[in-house]
Image (cartoon, rainbow, N blue to C red):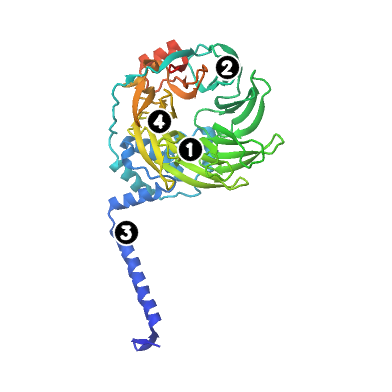
Amino acid sequence: MRTAKISGQGISFNNFCEILMSGYSFIGLSLVLLFFSCESVEKKEERYAKQYCASCHVFPEPKLLPKEIWKNHVLPNMAFRMGLTNLMEGAQYVPMPDLVTVAGTLPGRPMVSEEEWKLITHYFEKNAPDSLVIPVNGKLENLDLFEAIKLLDPDRSLPLITLVKADTLNQRIYLGTRTGKLTQFNSRFEIERSFPLSSPPSHISISNNELTVSLMGIMDPNDRTKGELSTYNADGNNQEILIDSLKRPVYFEEADLNADGKKDFIVCAFGNYTGELAVYENNGKSEYNKHVISTLPGSRRTLSRDFNDDGLIDILALFTQGDEQITLFINEGNFRLKQKILLRFPSVYGSTYFDIVDFNKDGRFDILYTNGDNSDYSQILKPYHGVRIFLQESNGTFSESWFYPMHGASKAVAFDFDLDGDLDIASFSFFPDFTKNPDQGFIYFENKEGNFYPLTLPEVTAGRWIVMDVADIDGDNDKDILLGALDFNTKVPKVLFQLWEEEKTAVLILRNRTK
């Protein structure tokens, strides 16, 4: 055996190497410690910010919000979420009845020290701009494809619509309100009947003259389990509560997840600080077994179908609160779903909606996406709000191929509205620039040889649109559009709000003139 003499003692060559490497490890550790000890304050601030602020969601670059918003709104709330309960400024955003529930979700001890948090806050305040550079969209050309018809509020009051749905089979339109009422109109836009609901409705499905409705409980941000899923007949009678104790449900789907021939419910319980995406298994005994798919708050919309062609229904979901993402849940049987994140967005983006469409006709679904929620901590115009198309690559990843800046973009759908063989896009905004561009609360993008040209109508200023449905309401084989208004006076010019009060337009029906 080869040996080496060290200090008069014989050791093996391998042992010598171990000693040598231990020395190198010690030196390496020393160098790391030396690096951090010599690290500048600026670098330390950046390191802590990226370490902690990317632990729960995509790291939000300081440039995305102005200094004042970071300092007085977003960062105090983040401190609260990270367990710095002595910095109780964040609690101002939690309704008093929800404090106990929310407190139970906070970390048992602070995730950061107060010294580290001071460095983090200084990093954002130092690197954030004083204000954002906001692009100003020019005046849009007039949209002649549609005829605008105004449907007045059934109560002749300021519209507070939370749901609009066209029933093309029975030629009806349903309106739900924040006050907890559902009104049914016939094809001539005359009221047929109206009946009370226990709380504001958010979504409805219609089957065999039976209505299944999700009721939010409380519409405003909260974490209370006041929501429910209920059924009614067309007359509003025979209510049956299918599922109760939901945290602000905003959307649901019916799908047979376990292929047993019975429809299960996929429910988006948006919540606020807390929430979940869950599947309720139909056990055939008028009862439902709950399977939680995700505990993320802000589940907003799902699309259920067999995405991988294995015979089982999968779920594509949008989460819009905190960790904003579009995620595919692959069904592996027996309500086991494997998560695959397709797209992830900064936490300040304000994601609002998505749909899947094959824009480039390559056989793979692409994603149409909007972001523009401005109702939380930063109610300002943002240059990154708008409508986007993400094309799916051959390897299953998605890349942004088109973006149109649209303040407060709330929803976009793609159809061949003008029947010329390509896909157009209809979109609306709940938070447009009411001061400079009030007519851009709705924008139609006409597809001309693969390019989208924005158009609008003057009648769009008749309301503050919060919901939209697309359907052939007059039976002429082209798609019409219905916009529902929830008019409240936040960052709205006085003259415009007075117009809403006078006209009381609950729904703007855009009747397609193509046929």
Residue that carries the numbered disc 3 in the rendered image? 36
Cα distance in 3D space between marks 1 and 3: 39 Å
Q: Quadrant of the N terminus?
A: bottom left
Residue type at the position of mark 1: Leu
Cα distance in 3D space between marks 4 and 3: 39 Å
Task: Say what secondary structure mark 2 lies in.
Answer: strand
Measuring from the top left, give residue 424's x and y in whole percent.
40, 27
Instruction: Of the two numbered discs 1 and 3 on the same chain, state the one appearing first in sequence.
Output: 3
Residue type at the position of mark 3: Phe
Instruction: Of the two numbered discs 2 and 1 on the same chain, state the one appearing first in sequence.
Output: 2
Q: Quadrant of the C terminus?
A: top left
Residue type at the position of mark 4: Asn
Instruction: Of the two numbered discs 2 and 4 on the same chain, state the one appearing first in sequence.
Output: 2
Q: Residue 487 versus residue 231: which sits nearer the camera?
A: 231
Instruction: Of the two numbered discs 4 and 3 on the same chain, state the one appearing first in sequence.
Output: 3
- Picture quarter containing residue 231? top right
Residue that carries the numbered disc 1 in the rendered image? 318
Residue that carries the numbered disc 2 in the rendered image? 184
Q: Badge 1: how crowded within 10 Å, few (<14), some, or many (20+)? A: many
Measuring from the top left, give residue 188's x and y in whole percent.
54, 11
Residue type at the position of mark 2: Gln
The image shows residue 421, relative to residue 302, as above or below, that is above
Task: Say what secondary structure mark 3 lies in.
Answer: helix
Q: Residue 45 versus residue 436: which sits nearer the camera?
A: 436
Cα distance in 3D space between marks 2 and 1: 30 Å
- Residue in the picture at 57% in, 26% down: 204
Q: Nearer the viewer, mark 4 or mark 1?
A: 1
